[in-house]
């Protein structure tokens, strides 16, 4: 059974710092991996989607990498800002279509201090 | 989120009453999902649909039923609400043309008293 783990559970950094959030998964046979952001009391906003054949994806100050063989993904946030404060969720999909469920980690709660 | 809306946004109901939550999409995506989010458990799949009238159970389906009579609408029904079903419910959509990336709705906060 696929399990997704995110470390650390919480992280506090000063504004301007570059940071890395970690995600690991137990079964490397994944279809894709997706990073989400969730603000308190809000829904999930998709940040980056990495297909199993890709090694990384970039969007603005965000860069996500994928190493299937080791079962790991990282989300790199450059020059962090207070507006980046949120919970970041990693999720993996084992198969395409309806055959694969999206399995979520418990998230990393990020706080960026001004 | 653009293209997917959930209603109602908030609901308080009494134990034993039926409750229906609605998810509506304008993206014409084939797949639709219902998740619940609880502290300590994260997001868990309740039911999903892979087409009109085609649905299947997820990880935590007991006490819930779903229906999809049109591509754009996916309904989640709690036949007889219990306090353990107090949660935040999220609908999501995905499709092949978006590489099966998921888009989530804003959620429904349900309280069963």
Image: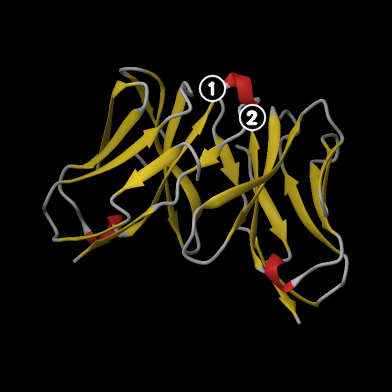
Residue at 74 percent of width and 51 percent of height: A23
Gap in Å between the C-alphas at discs 1 and 2?
Answer: 8 Å
Report if residue A53 is visible in the image: yes
Residue at 72 percent of width and 73 percent of height: A82
Rate crowding at label 2 as few (under 14), some (14 to 19) or many (20 or more) other CA atoms within 10 Å.
many
Asked if residue A12 is positioned above or below residue B42 in the image, the reply reads below
- Where in the figure is residue A26, as x and y percent of width and height? 71, 41
Q: Quadrant of the N terminus of chain A?
A: top right
Q: Is residue A25 left or right of residue B83?
A: right
Q: How is the image coloured?
A: secondary structure
Task: Give whichever of discs 1 and 2 has the lower sequence position.
Answer: 2
Viewer-nearest residue: A86 or B36: A86
Residue at 31 percent of width and 21 percent of height: B70
Same chain under badges 1 and 2? The reply is yes
- Where in the figure is residue B108, as x and y percent of width and height? 35, 53
Which residue in the protein does label 1 denote? Answer: A99
Viewer-nearest residue: A95 or B6: B6
Residue sitting farthest toward the bottom: A114
Chain label for disc 1: A
Report if residue B62 is visible in the image: no
Chain label for disc 2: A
Question: Residue A108: which quarter of the image?
Answer: bottom right
Residue at 81 percent of width and 50 percent of height: A60
CB under 8 Å between discs 1 and 2: yes
Which residue in the protein does label 2 denote? Answer: A94
């Amino acid at each position: 059974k696929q399990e997704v783990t995110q470390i650390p559970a919480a992280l506090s950094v000063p504004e301007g710092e570059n940071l890395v959030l970690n995600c690991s998964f137990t079964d490397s046979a994944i279809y894709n991996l997706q990073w989400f952001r969730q603000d308190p009391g809000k829904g999930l906003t998709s940040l980056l989607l990495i297909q199993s054949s890709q090694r990384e994806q970039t969007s603005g100050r965000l860069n996500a990498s994928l190493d299937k063989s080791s079962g790991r993904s990282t989300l790199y946030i450059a020059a962090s800002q207070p507006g980046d404060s949120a919970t970041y969720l990693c999720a993996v999909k084992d198969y395409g279509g309806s055959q694969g469920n999206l399995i979520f980690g418990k998230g990393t709660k990020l706080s960026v201090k001004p | 989120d653009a293209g997917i809306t959930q209603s109602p946004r908030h609901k308080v109901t009494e134990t034993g009453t039926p409750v229906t939550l609605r998810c509506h999409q304008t993206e014409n995506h084939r797949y639709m999902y219902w998740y619940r989010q609880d502290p300590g458990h994260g997001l868990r799949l309740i039911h999903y649909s892979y087409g009109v009238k085609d649905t299947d159970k997820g990880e935590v389906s007991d006490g819930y039923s779903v229906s999809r009579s049109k591509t754009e609408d996916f309904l989640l029904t709690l036949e007889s609400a219990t306090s353990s079903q107090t949660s935040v419910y999220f609908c999501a959509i995905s499709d092949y043309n978006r590489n099966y990336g998921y888009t989530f709705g804003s959620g429904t906060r349900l309280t069963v008293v």
